[in-house]
Image: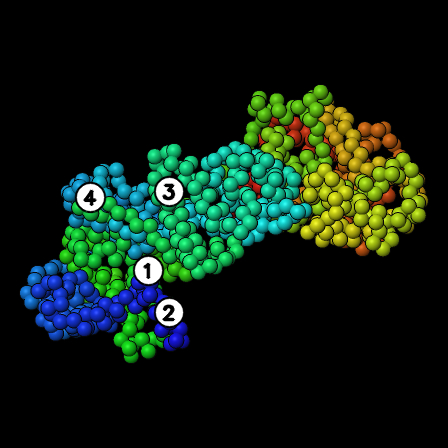
Amino acid sequence: MYPLYANFRKALSSEGIGYGGMIYRLAAETVKEKSATNFEFKRIVFVGFSTLSATERQIFDKFKTLKIGDFYWDFESPFFDDWNKGSFFIRDYIKEYPSKYDLSQPAQLPNVEVHSIPSGSGQAQIVAKIVDNLIESGKITGTDSDIDTAIVLPEEKYLNAVLYSIPPKIKSLNITMGYPFSQTPVQSLISSLAILNQRKRIVNGETAYFYEDIEAIVSHPYINSICSSRISQMLQNAKDKRYFFVPISFLTESVNELSFIFNDFANDVIAYCDNILSQIYMRLSKQQENKIEQYFIDKTRQSLKQLETTLANYEIEIGGQSFFFLLSRLLSGMAVAFEGEPLRGLQIMGVLETRLLDFKNLIVLSMNEKVFPTKRYSRSFIPNNLRTGYRMATFEYQDSMYTYYFYRMISRSQNVYLLYDSRTQGTSSGEESRYIYQLDKVYNRGKNKHILYEYDVKTPETFPICVYKNDYIWNKLSEYLRPESGKFLSASSLNAYIDCPLKFYLTRVEGINEEIEMTDFIDRATFGQVVHGVFERLYAPMCGHTVTASYLDQYLAPHSPALDTVVTEALNTYYNHIDDVSRPLSGEAILIGKIVVYYVRNVILHDKRLTPFDYLASEMKTAFNWDFDDGLTVNFKLIVDRLDRVSGNLRIVDYKTGSDEIKISDDKTFSSLFEGNKRNKAILQVLLYCNAYAQATGYREAITPVIYKLRNSHTCREGKYEIINGKKAISDYRVDIDNENFMNRIKETMHEIFNRDIPFTQTADTHSCAYCQFKEMCGRDMPDK
């Protein structure tokens, strides 16, 4: 290690630069060799020091020996007694480095108010209240003369909250502190760019970006403001096309203005980032209020230039991922320095900025343990016992330093307001700082005023949401009764109403569609579309013909090209959303295809045992006007997945990829179909299809309702696909169930929908709300609901 250390120092010295400790040591060694005549001044005064490092002590010793050093310590305070940790070091310093003149002044204990607030950012609101009280009491004026009042922020992250909460009566203020660059919008943009380029892929010979990463980038305020409406449309189009990885060509064609972000920068990642920041800077410069954002971007570009110069000097070539890592590390350690007029107005500053300054009125936020004083940590590899032995800074040194800062800061104040976050959550215990305890128990016994804030958060009383069928709503609903309207109810519409009348209103009357969310893998609805598409293609040549075992054998052969073809076409149509349906699958689609093949083969194996059978139609659509008696005629449509005839019996087949049940427990009331959160929606749908088909076509013979449960494909292989009523399989919906009772329940539901006196209400069964997209609107997203 030592040769590395020595060579590193030598390399830095040759360039005239050094790190902090090295420069301090060089200063001490330089001073050590000089005499009093080597200095320009006859007397050198040292002011403002509190805890001295080893090099500082060497310098102090030298000037003391030369008798030209004069040392002054800010130590006169009623708080600095023998037991105060902040006085441990300075008491020794006073003895070792005495002052020439006695400048001490008597000090009194300040008035202390401790405010306990169950919120972090909520402290800013209490700051506003305190400032208002100071103005009303005449302690401050709200003008330039308020330089004796300071707001101290141990946590810089609350700066914005404090600035926005300052009362308008304050006409002048000054900010003197560093704002962490990690809190700026530029840092979040750089992070999003890093992730965007880290996860990009080559898809079909073209660079493509992960959808979620694109969404994060274009949602950034710097980017979204460029053309928000077209960005929204682009995202929607990408969803429609099921683009998990979105190609560059699609992005640039959709929103050409963003081509400076979505481009293949090859190896010149620095120029890529600089161009993005330059483009944003030019757009921001058109508006005067964006000066701060421009400043952030300018600082980032300076850091880019610094990094570029360093890499060039050492002839280092790095890839995009390494570059973004280095840039993020560089920016994360930066602080944006806010500077103003220090002799005007209310002062806002950090803890370190209060050194050597005295204020009559002090408002200190974040007075929590492990915040002020900060939690102890060391980034050094040197163990604490070695640091102690060599008089290097230790944890005790850090504790003493912050203790001194605090008590020195409040020593000459008249009014001190200490605020802390009392919440107990995560890693925060809500514990007040040890300094507050010390003020209460040692120095200001019983004199400190404690104010406890409690947010009286009451869950608002919720009332059932009812949408009454006024003229406007009734007119829209009545479109389902007018034959010429082109609007039809369906089995899924009835299921939606039974689940929740309010959801039926929102989706079927107001036409609010459920929002499609992009997922990392295929969702249930799309998987169902793919499976239906496979069967439609597989049986398309046989519509109106007899299916034989030999026809199905071509799809059952090992690695069947015929089956692979229809699966590929279905996936490219419903999952990849591309026109070239024969394009070979890639990525996740290959895995999905294997799952689909497994399900479909099991169904084909079952169908082979039924051969020969007549295949009549796939995805058969029928629309008609259904007369439900009592003058109610409703536009109704049905889409039958499969219509076939086996052994002379007509079958209506419904493919289900979910966990739907195929058993009816009670055919008197049909409660298992119409009631409860686990009701059998699939059975209701296929029985309704049987009745609707008979009504629409006049068919009066037996119809067998069938549900192919693909999730449990072994049931299909074993022939267990029938719907069971009690213990008997249903082969004829007219005979094997009490179909009259079933249709009475359907008629009751239809009459309820079109009864103007019955409003659309929320469902009483909150289990139905678990995955509903409207649950937040209805207030059903709360745990106690």
Horizontal side, residue 193 vs residue 287: left or right: right
Question: Where is mark 4, residue-wise?
Answer: 345
Question: Where is mark 1, residue-wise?
Answer: 371
| Tag nearer the camera, 4 or 3 | 3
Question: Where is mark 2, residue-wise?
Answer: 8
Q: What is the CA distance from the residue labelled 2 to the residue labelled 1? A: 35 Å
* Point 24% across, 55% down: residue: 353
Quick one: SS at disc 4? Answer: loop
Q: How is the image coloured?
A: rainbow
Q: Amino acid at mark 3?
A: Glu
Where is residue 90 drawn, in percent x and y? 18, 69
Q: Quadrant for residue 42, please give it.
A: bottom left
Along the line of sight, which residue is nearer the eye, 331 or 221? 331
Along the line of sight, which residue is nearer the eye, 445 or 20? 20
Q: Is residue 693 above or below residue 57?
A: above
Where is residue 635 drawn, in percent x and y? 72, 26
Q: What is the CA distance from the residue labelled 2 to the residue labelled 4? A: 47 Å
Q: Amino acid at mark 2?
A: Phe
| Tag nearer the camera, 4 or 1 | 4
Mark 4 or mark 1: name the one nearer the start of the chain.
4
* Point 55% across, 35% down: residue: 255
Neighbour tally class for label 3: few under 14, some 14-19, many 20 plus, Cα within 10 Å: some
Mark 2 or mark 4: name the one nearer the start of the chain.
2
Quick one: SS at disc 1? Answer: loop
Q: Amino acid at mark 4?
A: Gly
Quick one: SS at disc 2? Answer: helix
